[in-house]
Amino acid sequence: MKIVYNKEGFVDFENPVYMEEDKFEKFTKFLVDLTKEKIEVKKVKEKERFVNIEGRHPQRWGAGELILLLDTKLSKDDLVKKLKRSIMSILMQKAQFVPEFISWAKSKGYDSNKISKTIIEQFLEEKDGNS
């Protein structure tokens, strides 16, 4: 465990420290004895990280969702509403999928104005076959 102490006098632990309730009570009592000050404990709910909008586990992207990423008329907010995914998930998938798919589609001779779910499904099958 690392304890960080900066020049302004702040002390911080490098990572959160897990304590069961009884250990936490002993820890707070120790701090009261050490500092001779009253300690106010505020319980907070930790922010959940990297969880999509509905709190589900990450799900595989389907052709019906991926085709929406190619639609230049949809805003980021529109994509969030239609896909029910976080903006970060959408941006990451778009950055990975769009260039790879466009390159693949060009190599197969597909017209970029006539992309369909069927073509995206073909791309996904080929990609999965190569993995």
Image: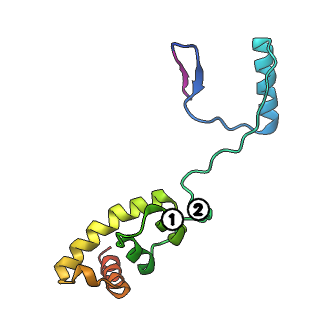
Q: Amino acid at mark 2?
A: Ile
Please state, as top left, top right, bottom left or bottom right, where the N terminus lies in the image: top right
Q: Are marks 2 and 1 in contact (CB under 8 Å)?
A: yes
In percent of width and height, residue 77 lies at: 49, 62
User: Gap in Å between the C-alphas at discs 2 and 1?
Assistant: 9 Å
The residue indicated by pointer 2 is: 53
Q: Is residue 24 above or below residue 36?
A: below
Q: Secondary structure at mark 2?
A: loop
Q: Nearer the viewer, residue 121 or 87?
A: 87
Q: What residue lies at 80% left-to-right and 17% top-to-bottom? A: 32
Magenta highlight range: 2-6
Residue 21 falls in which quadrant of the image? top right
Q: Amino acid at mark 1?
A: Val
Q: Is residue 125 left or right of residue 47?
A: left
Give the number of the mark in front: 2 or 1.
Answer: 1
The residue indicated by pointer 1 is: 80
Residue 14 falls in which quadrant of the image? top right
Crowd class of label 1 (few under 14; some 14 to 19; many from 20; radius 10 Å):
some
